[in-house]
Image: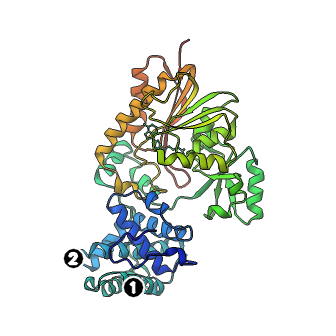
Amino acid sequence: MQCISKGNRLTDHKTLRSLPLSEAITISAQAVGEVMSGRSLTEVLDQLEPHERPIVQSLTFDALRKWVRSHELIKQFIPKPPPVEVDHLLSVAIALFLQGTSDGKGYAAHTIVDQAVQACEQYDKTLYAKGLVNAVLRKVSLIVNPPEGEVRYPPDPIPMFFPPWWRANLKRNYPKSWQGLQIAQAQRAPLIVRVNTRQYTRDQYQELLNDANIAATPIEEVAGVKLNSALLLRDPVPVIDLPGFYSGAVSVQDSGAQVAATLLNPQPGEKILDACAAPGGKTAHLLELADCEMLALELDGGRLGKITGNLDRLRLSSENVRVVRGDASKAAWWDGQLFDKILLDAPCSASGIVSRHPDIPFLRREADIRTLQHKQREIMAQAWKMLKPEGLLLYVTCSVFPEEGEDQAQWFATEHANAVRLSSPGQILPTEANDGFYYALFKKNGS
Ligand SMILES: C[S@@+](CC[C@H](N)C(=O)[O-])C[C@H]1O[C@@H](n2cnc3c(N)ncnc32)[C@H](O)[C@@H]1O
């Protein structure tokens, strides 16, 4: 990772064989700073060296997930807000204490304090960071792990930050479950994989996992849709430890996302458009299910390589699969041939996948929802013109806001007299076992 904070002494992580905790805290605190200045965490993490990524990702995710709780504690012990770099470092270190208590594992308290204080070396002496961090963490340690017989810090049901407009939206639309939704989204997301059924059945792959001492259980269905390739791993492992990962046996994909290709039910020879394709998870799943003629469209040229990379790894690239850069809300890239089926996995707030992307609540603005809604309608209207009569269009978002889900499906059905709504799950809410998605399936009536 490049130096991203002033006074950073870390210039060459490549030389480190493994990452000491103090280094990981330093990089994570910088990554938190990047998110606070509006940058996507995925982009920041993509800059890391492979050996840095697992621990830095884990620490940064936890810091963002525990933001509200860690800042209550910081406020309790430092009445005046600390310098912003120190605040970020404390949020990482405090999350280590909090996470440690929730899963029973974790670092010893003295190790966290010691390593966080070491991480302060990077700061200008005038910030007095060492003393401050040492004092605060020692107090936090006593609160989180109190001496025998003393009262524990009362658990805050929602340790994660959600902006007020977001909470108001959930409360309005899910008056009974809005708090539960936020609690589910503040959890560490489980690792779920999709078996490439061109190479193995789910049972066969589960046996391979078993042989590698990786415990997994099948996820049979999500929202009434039967899945035949989803496996839930009991403990997360790096992808390199998944048997056959590099020869395309398996991909990491949430079970809620595996509903898309299953619902669209591709058949050999069908002409299918994946209108918003990168990084290609759903394109690949469609191709695993049938030899269809696939056009994977993506607006962001920088993300095209992710689609081809995934297809190559999964051994799915062929002359029947085209990966094209283009804007799905326009027809400039289109050769005029109609599609049998269209998957429209639209750009959205990503409010349903917060447990995998805890930076989202920090990055989204309320005004984004209206802009996204407008774009989604443009893409839907354009895609409909490219669909054969009797063809199917599957509209998908990974959002929990009805503005990007049911409202859009209703608008579409009203605007398009030849659209027949078929049975589909509609809103799938996030749980500890799946992310939140919205699905609406339409058939085009007429000859
Ligand atoms: C939700 S993601 C798609 C995820 C993908 N279907 C998968 O399962 O791996 C939405 C994608 O749409 C792309 N996108 C945004 N606006 C677009 C447009 N107007 N035309 C085509 N792609 C667009 C984004 O760059 C992003 O890669």
Residue that mark 2 sits on: 80
Q: Could you tell me which quadrant the C terminus lies in?
A: top right
Q: Is residue 429 visible?
A: no
Q: Nearer the viewer, residue 435 or 171?
A: 435
- Residue at the spot 56% in from the left edge and 53% down from the top edge: 433
Query: In x, y percent, where is residue 401?
Result: 39, 42
- Residue at the spot 40% in from the left edge and 63% down from the top edge: 157
Side of 272 relative to 63 (left or right): right
Question: Which residue sits furthest top?
Answer: 447
Residue that mark 1 sits on: 117
Of the numbered discs 2 and 1, the one sitting upstream in the chain is 2
**Mark 2 or mark 1: which is in front?**
1
Q: CA distance from mark 2 to mark 1?
A: 20 Å
Q: Which amino acid type is marked by label 1? A: Val
- Residue at the spot 40% in from the left edge and 64% down from the top edge: 64
Badge 2 residue CB within 8 Å of ligand 1: no
Q: Is residue 419 visible?
A: yes
Q: What element does badge 1 sit on?
A: helix
Side of 5 relative to 200 (left or right): left
Please determine whether, in this image, residue 276 is positioned above or below residue 161. above
Q: Nearer the viewer, residue 375 or 143?
A: 375
